[in-house]
Image (cartoon, coloured by chain):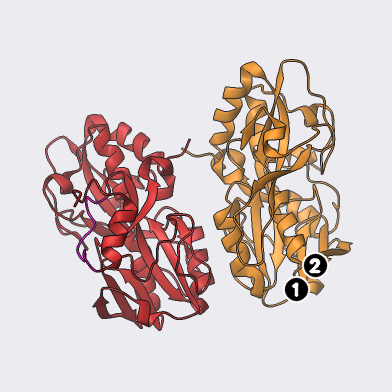
Chain colours: A orange, B red
Amino acid sequence: MKKIDKMSPKEVRALIRTGEWQKSTAGFALGYAQANLVILPGQYAFDFLLYCQRNPKPCPLLEVLEPGKYITEFLAASADVTTDIPLYNVYKRGRLAATIQNVEDLWQDDFVTFLLGCSYSFEEALMKVKIPVRHIEEGRNVPMYITNIPCKPAGIFRGPMVVSMRPVPEALVVKAVQVTSRYAAVHGGPVHIGNPAKIGIRNLHKPDFGDSVTIKTGEVPVFWACGVTPQAAVMEAKPDICITHAPGHMFISDILNEELASQ
Amino acid sequence: MKKIDKMSPKEVRALIRTGEWQKSTAGFALGYAQANLVILPGQYAFDFLLYCQRNPKPCPLLEVLEPGKYITEFLAASADVTTDIPLYNVYKRGRLAATIQNVEDLWQDDFVTFLLGCSYSFEEALMKVKIPVRHIEEGRNVPMYITNIPCKPAGIFRGPMVVSMRPVPEALVVKAVQVTSRYAAVHGGPVHIGNPAKIGIRNLHKPDFGDSVTIKTGEVPVFWACGVTPQAAVMEAKPDICITHAPGHMFISDILNEELASQ
């Protein structure tokens, strides 16, 4: 068998589909974009699509399937969103009801599937230009914080923006803005540089999600919009049912991260 | 009374609302973005929103109002989409049924309003860097062509991309790409440079919409995605009712064109 980081996205999805791989997708099919998953019943689909349209930085849509469709068209040829993700979370009325390996049996004809860009794509771009990504260096999850930046509500969906933080050496902050701004389809440029208090973060060492990371002397905290934002909005809205990927267990697309960069 | 090109967007909208101005908005409130209007009944709203999400170059959404809402929130403070546009086209089952000055009486509680970016914004940017915009120089409408570039269908909405063409001196083609690429929210960079036949255009001097313009020796035809694309898709889908702005009679926003540029 090929090494897993050398496999094509299609090969990895096949392993996942047959249940041979049920763990995190971090480090898989390197270079290819991974995506967050949100599946909602049709009655919530317009509101959620509008929420994403109004808040593109935290909710960068890569593909939306039509009601009832579970085979992707654009991000991958013929991937099945009910089987091709290693682990799913099923929420009922905003509470985690199950964590399971496939959701074929839960499928409803009115389900609408949303696949959203994730920060893995721009982290690859940062590392390519030698900007350190601390949580990867330290083998932790990225620290994430609930801010005082309001998202634009849409229908039943609302809530504050959640951001991720990466400490960047002062001399590389401009470069970090430039590099990530090219990736508008996957959160884009930062939403804030420098002062956590300004965006409602009291203590950088106590993130609301993920892990604390080391901030070295001469490093500036840089904050990017985070894909937890729409997940938190969905949980808060308490739809009858919602299916998401389990954290770190993502959809692997056939699209190169580089293809998501503008120009 | 102030000269009309010096008026603020709010002042112009007030003139339009009271019926004092019922003509084209070209040259009004210079520097501010103008927007195309599409109003559809709720049953078509998800499909149309998805069509725009899948085809952002021809269908750049600037604001979508929630079902039943007719007051804008983001593009302008408290503009009324039923009165603040000088002239409306009302289509029934894909055929023009009326051209009227306000649509208050036609309003339905399930109507969803879409405001889309228009090329006026990037034409201002082209002229600022001294790239000629021929149809403006010649006092004509921009030439537009139906291409062989398919849009991604969504629900009942489908059709080819319609493009606008501007002849650009060879030496300025790169600049034209760079300048317009910054305006992703209003069609962005060109979709094709140079060879009309390649995108299914037989005769540049016989546009499908608008007027033919002069192409001088040493000029290259450059093609941008055009806002007629979604309008054509809507006409083809034949919804019970659809309301749009009449050509050239646009919604004037409080947003500067420059604010729509990335970074």
Q: Where is residue A184? Give x, y as percent.
A: 55, 42
The label number, if any, that marks residue A185 in the structure image: none
Q: Which residue is mark 1?
A: A107
Q: Chain of mark 1?
A: A
Residue A22 vs residue B250, the one in the foreground: B250
Q: Is residue A125 above or below residue B133?
A: above
Question: Which quarter of the figure has residue B210?
Answer: bottom left
Three-letter amino acid code at disc 2?
Val
Q: Which residue is mark 2?
A: A103
Marks 2 and 1 belong to one chain: yes
Three-letter amino acid code at disc 1?
Trp
Residue B155 in view here: no
Question: Which quarter of the figure has residue A16?
Answer: bottom right
Q: Circles 2 and 1: CB distance less than 8 Å?
A: yes
Q: Chain of mark 2?
A: A
Q: Where is residue B195? Give x, y as percent.
A: 26, 46
Mark 2 Cα within 10 Å, few/some/many (few <14, many 20+)? Answer: some
Highlighted range, magenta = B19-28
The quadrant of the picture occupied by the N terminus of chain A is top right
Q: Residue at x 63, y 31 (%)?
A: A125
Q: Secondary structure at mark 2?
A: loop
Q: Is residue B70 above or below residue B203?
A: below
- Give how far apart the Cα atoms at labels 2 and 1 are: 6 Å
Q: Is residue A84 above or below residue A253?
A: below
Q: Is B20 a magenta residue?
A: yes
Q: Is A242 a magenta residue?
A: no
Residue A20 in view here: yes
Residue B238 vs residue B246, the one in the foreground: B246
Q: Is residue B230 left or right of residue A193?
A: left
